[in-house]
Image: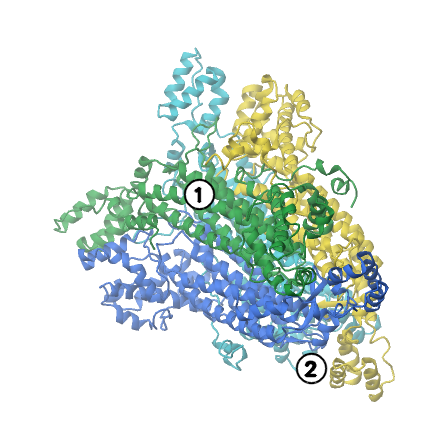
Chain colours: A yellow, B cyan, C blue, D green
């Protein structure tokens, strides 16, 4: 490559001049929620994985360096990222080009930060993938916990919203058209069910995220030999226990086996993240639609205004969430493509494709769910608009009920005539009253034409959703 | 549309002249496995859903027509498809254009097949989506069970294969290069773990697949009013129980609520199917690679030959499985895109996008796993090729072990010299022996240079995988 | 594989009992438009490719069998599919499993239909991929031409629609909110521009679709040797000319070289098809939105009704087109995934993944554009709704103009007060008139508050789009 | 949102403490090539678009502020990014959350950097989307030019490589198996054709990338009114000319019309970028495969070594390129999904989904093609390995030729016997000689068994590719 193309990479001290690629300028949906998944956070996870490995060895009896190394890098406890990295993300990024991954330069950088006597303890028996995958799982576990928090907050707000609007009749729309009545609360209860399911799934997946420790090709051969060499033959079972000890230091699940090319931990997580974004995407799609100028039933609390067009009240959070919901499925699919193409004991490309993809998916999930939580907190209902829309079809929104309850009283043909006349603009109540009289039916229309009296089990469904009953 | 464009749709009796779009000509990976997901099978599921609804009403007390209708359409028991459809898929397909879905013409066709007195029992209180979604879940449950069978068969064969080759040392490859030794058995054990995880997940998802029953907008209002009208006011709780009764008739899980726009049942299934295809995709990628002329460690039992090129032994099943693995992630993503865009009480496009996508994904899963099961059954190992490849680096495949165990004895610099010389073609054993002598070390090389002695915990990992231990 | 799993494949005569996988039941968007891409059509293309090859050889001097073979299979002229196939798609599908593609059994079937003396002329020097790729291109060229027709019809209808509504002011919406006025015509003109660009691109790509002819590994070695053997050494240049001759018989572009693993002909076509579907997808998204009960500005001519809910006028064609637009990008991406993974001289899976994917994408393009053409033909505008919506913000839809033209006359602060008051419901015209008077400005409001007077260059843009001017 | 969640966004001066999300740590394939698409570069493009707008107005006669503003922000000439931004990307990112896009805070920041008398000239008549889309096109045009450079360099290197190895026979592989001979040069020529096609397409698309200028809803109404207000009624045509003038300042194509919801400029670019990545992906797939330890025909110049495993020579650049090729199709599809869902005059999510996606796709294209250019420069052929592999099937690699040329001389049955015996390990030449003698054929085997004599038109195809002949 010509030197003017990659000056920063090969230059000695020029690395600090590289501008960061992404500070969030093109990603408003995630700004403010990115912190758990920055390169800095990933770097901390990498360092933490290396330190955790020295600690796992210490548990097995080869731990003279444990305390010094832990102290040097700011070990902060199981599942917590280290605090004193002594390594620069920029430099590692540059070093990763020749090596193909950032762990190779990381090892050198960490060793350089240590007294020579401690250096052999670093990366002992591990392969790059052990550290990178474990770091990714640590990052993921922490980010997913944040996403779960966002979803839990949204669930609370949705339950309150659904309860508050449990009995507020509103037009239900299918294929864009008013169909029958529903309630504002039931719509929110359905959002709640989708969010809760996604949160439950993400919690389950997060609890399963395993550490990775298998050595160069997943046989743990180097770990085994190092244990035998340094701890003696009585250490025969030591290597077998190291993955679980390593996982415990990282607050991750112990791996059933090395999963260098068995990538369900990545795809199951990816799927759960996409599902979470889907769930808030549905909410956002409904809020955006119901915020339309002509509909106006819902409004975001902090709707984006426009100085030149003060009549606008942009559903900004919904728009941003939707942008994430459009992108996320493609990111999840990328993880599956990579997973399905894993070959050999470490694949020639698919593994590398996972890294930025999973990070971006975590980031989108953080942003989409974080925005959703805020959105629901501030969501307001325009009762007048709800009522106005419900009346928009001149009462025909209960036509399904009429076919059930009025047709037997006045005949199906008569009902069809009435509905046709109402469609042309005649007053439905007048027509129904006349038809009943004509049929000699003195029962009267009662609440037949009241949309609020034709919401079926909406209230029950709201209660069940709010209470979390099956 | 010009009449010459769509002659079959609008013509009176010309429908039988339409050629089927797909009989499998472009889909060899699924030929022979398609049956559970043909349009005919889906049609049967649609009819079954309608009949099941009449049966659920019967359980609730409104079932005078139950037996006659069940008999008319060949009801075959809970979870089984009806056997006497009396409806043509072709005609329904044509009728679905104006209606937007095939349920509308289905209702007419089923009613036409019944005595007028029975017709009102059909589609009672339901909406098209209730029937279509429930039919899709019924189809899915049956197809998924078949996929689970395929995976279970593959697991059995993989366990046997892994056990049989538990201790057969082979070259492990990372980033295409020989790294350290592994075993033929461990590679298969890793396939097994991926397949088992996918099967377990698919079983869990399948058990959760719910029926759909919510009426026009998910409030169950029509169901409720019909119950009150026909069963009297004491039927107040009837509608609430109908979804579970309907689900029981279909052998599906009772829905927590209508899920018209809460589409996790579709996406969780889709994700599990993609995961299953990923898992066999990895196996296929490895078999295809290890079948390469230059590698030749594995061969499919029924490798595709070529009359003009008899030296070829194409890994045909692997190739076909890989074609599915390349496609599946994109299909799974389509389901998520549709899910995230669900809006209103029935969305204007996303729902319709699911139908052919989920069917194709089920089909691919059937084909990919069915082929995988057969592939593993016939898989053969060329022991000579395995041994030849293992020796290909002149012993350097154990260089990692040498750095652990030989370096302390002869010094790291000396080892580096040896490795460099071996890389240039000198005999590694001679070099090692000389270095030990030179260092005054009389311990001898022992099994240091034996790849089979450097497979770490491979055997243990095989045993654990085969036994299903964590 | 167990025999009960794949009975139809291995059975002797049972093949005719296999139900077709897909007759369109799950694909209403394509019903009536599928014909150019059915398995039957693909089978005809395969046969045509084989016959064309015999004709290309004949042009080169090795054509004694040409007329008989052409007659036997119903050769119908360059670029036309053969009419007398003598082969069953079902049987080929079954035969493709062991072979990995349908061409192997095709060759046998075609030979079996010929006098033994003619059989050697079939598949002379070709490889399966030559025939399958060429057949796919032939199918694609014909299907793409139909798509181009659909788009051209839609362009005509859109031009007429845009002209008819050139000056009809309507609310423009950004981020769901009324922003400023636009015109009904300009919205249609924008659809037109998208459709025209897509049509132009698809025409360009279609004209480039090449035949494939390279022999087993793209060297044309067999073709060359056969020519030398049978035509003598003076035939030295024959093989080089065969691909172009073959392409001419098929009405395809001559290939620059065999493109067995250089798959731009597939991905450029795929991209153009997705672009076409995008273009009508935008139109459908707008029609669906503007058909909403609360908006009601547009209606499809043949809106789907509902007997139980007569107030509904479902934008069915738009919904179906949207279902295609949601799916298409994922299909296009599948083609790119396959393209990027092509390896060796014929890849181990990616090529096979293309076949059903490209067919489904062609099918979706046929259906989406076919429905779009019909949709535009029948599209109606509800003038009253357009006007009602335009007035919905009480005149504030021209607030941007006021900030430009009124602010200089009354001051920006005064304008802000007016707009705030109008937002609260006060009459904008009264406020503006008062402010002008107060400012001593006697110019009057003129057309300042008339939305129709603030449509900028909409009319010009419509004219340019309709006339196709840049 | 809880304050501890988004401390940086709402804090007054804390913004500088936010860590960048991405400095390349997870993206080794792009490190060193990212510069044209960093957030800093995008910020420069945004500022440039705003300055270009003031310059376009100046051309139209409203340009008193032009020079001062150009100077203030470091205007650098048409198509060049401004050099003195006076705005922080971080701060804009934070400001974009409430506004939904970074242009709103950009305008404020740019105005704040100017004398109050000049402020009105900023963003005059434009909408956020005008600036953001134009900036994205400016960024794209510059980045695409760099990609074109990379591809052009790769073409040069590939042409040299193909010529150098024009006549070097090598095994061709189909479905992983040796099929017939090809040449090292032809394989490279095919890579060249794919790269050249992609480069040609990208150049064509780049030349078409339009500026965006339409005002709030694409009618140019504000631009028109401002022109009339400030330049007088003789300025009637001014607004119509502004988009082309604006485009000229930015070095972009003049737009046929505002394309706020007609997104082919984005998807055509995306498709071309994916095609470019596909093309180098194929090259990388082949290099990775041919670098396998068992194959060893090719090696990257700077293959990644491993200190512990010196026998490894990782094809690192190929691996990294493949990681991009796996991801890119999904990014391209995201752009299509967004395009197809564009609705209204500015859509509620799809537009926002484009930004990070297109940037990441440009970035991947820069990195993948940049790495490819370097890879080809350093690519080496191991002649011995090529020859060894070619001989691996004991001569059967020319079996196709034997069926053409030997079968007529000794009979097809005899040939089949020979091939079967050779498959079992007998010497092919001996067998052939014996068969010829037995058949009384004294012509001898000649070069029948020489793979190098059965490469067909490989040399011609190389020449045509290298010379760029069709």
In this view, the residue farthest toward the top is B440
Q: Nearer the viewer, residue D51 or B290?
A: D51
Q: Nearer the viewer, residue B283 or C371?
A: C371
Residue at screen point 38% across, 54% down: C259
Residue at screen point 33% across, 73% down: C74
Looking at the picture, how far across and down is residue B18, in whole percent? 48, 74
Q: Is residue B20 visible?
A: no
Q: Quadrant of residue C381?
A: bottom right
Q: Nearer the viewer, residue A75 or D263?
A: D263
Looking at the picture, how far across and down is residue D169, in whole percent? 29, 43
Q: Secondary structure at mark 2?
A: helix
Q: Quadrant of residue A395?
A: bottom right
Left or right of D45: which side holds D199?
Answer: left
Looking at the picture, how far across and down is residue D228, in whole percent? 68, 63
Q: Quadrant of residue C126?
A: bottom left
- Tell us which disc is closer to us: 1 or 2: 1
Badge 2: chain ID: B
Image: D212 above or below C306: above
Left or right of B330: which side holds D395?
Answer: left
Q: Is residue A361 visible?
A: yes
Image: A91 above or below C467: above
Labels 1 & 2 near each other (Cβ < 8 A): no
At label 1, counting other C-alpha atoms closer than 10 Å, the crowd grade (few under 14, some 14-19, many 20 or more) is: many
Please check whether the numbered discs 1 and 2 fall on a single chain: no
Which residue was labeled with disc 2?
Answer: B117
Looking at the picture, how far across and down is residue C311, in whole percent? 72, 76
Q: Secondary structure at mark 1?
A: helix
Q: Label 1 vs label 2: CA separation?
A: 70 Å
Which residue was labeled with disc 1?
Answer: D284
Badge 1: chain ID: D
């Amino acid at each position: 490559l010509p030197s003017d193309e990659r000056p920063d990479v090969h230059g000695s001290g020029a690395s600090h001049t590289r501008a960061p690629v992404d500070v969030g300028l093109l990603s408003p949906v995630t700004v403010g929620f990115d912190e758990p998944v920055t390169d800095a956070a990933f770097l901390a996870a990498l360092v933490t994985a290396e330190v955790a490995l020295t600690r796992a060895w210490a548990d097995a009896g080869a731990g003279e360096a444990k305390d010094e190394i832990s102290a040097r890098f700011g070990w902060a406890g199981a599942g917590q990222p280290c605090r004193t990295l002594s390594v620069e993300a920029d430099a590692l990024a540059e070093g990763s080009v020749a090596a193909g991954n950032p762990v190779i330069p990381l090892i050198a950088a960490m060793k350089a930060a240590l007294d020579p006597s401690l250096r052999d303890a670093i990366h002992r028996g591990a392969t790059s993938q052990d550290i990178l995958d474990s770091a990714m799982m640590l990052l993921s576990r922490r980010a997913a916990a944040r996403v779960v928090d966002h979803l839990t907050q949204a669930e609370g707000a949705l339950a309150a919203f659904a309860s508050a609007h449990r009995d507020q009749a509103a037009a239900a729309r299918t294929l864009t058209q008013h169909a029958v009545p529903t309630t504002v609360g039931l719509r929110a209860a359905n959002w709640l069910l989708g969010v809760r399911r996604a949160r439950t799934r993400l919690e389950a997946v997060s609890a399963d995220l395993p550490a990775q420790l298998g050595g160069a090709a997943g046989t743990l051969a180097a770990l085994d030999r190092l244990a035998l060499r340094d701890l003696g033959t009585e250490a025969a079972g030591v290597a077998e226990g190291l993955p679980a000890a390593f996982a415990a230091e990282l607050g991750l699940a112990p791996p059933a086996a090395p999963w260098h090319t068995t990538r369900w931990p990545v795809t199951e997580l990816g799927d759960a993240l996409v599902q979470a974004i889907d769930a808030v995407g549905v909410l956002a799609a409904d809020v955006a639609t119901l915020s339309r100028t002509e509909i106006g039933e819902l409004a975001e609390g902090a709707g984006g205004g426009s100085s030149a067009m003060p009549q606008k009240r942009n559903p900004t959070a919904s728009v941003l969430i939707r942008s994430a919901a459009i992108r996320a499925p493609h990111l999840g699919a990328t993880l599956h493509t990579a997973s399905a193409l894993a070959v050999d004991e470490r694949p020639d490309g698919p593994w590398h494709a996972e890294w930025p993809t999973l990070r971006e998916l975590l980031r989108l999930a953080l942003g989409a769910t974080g925005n959703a939580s805020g959105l629901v907190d501030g969501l307001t209902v325009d009762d007048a608009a709800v009522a106005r829309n419900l009346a928009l079809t001149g009462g025909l929104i209960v036509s399904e009920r009429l076919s059930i309850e009025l047709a037997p009283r006045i005949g199906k043909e008569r009902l069809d005539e009435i509905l046709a006349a109402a469609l042309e603009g005649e007053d439905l109540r007048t027509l129904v009253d006349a038809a009943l009289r004509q049929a000699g039916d003195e029962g009267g229309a009662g609440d037949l034409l009241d949309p609020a009296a034709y919401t079926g089990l909406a209230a029950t469904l709201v209660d069940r959703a709010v209470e979390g009953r099956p």
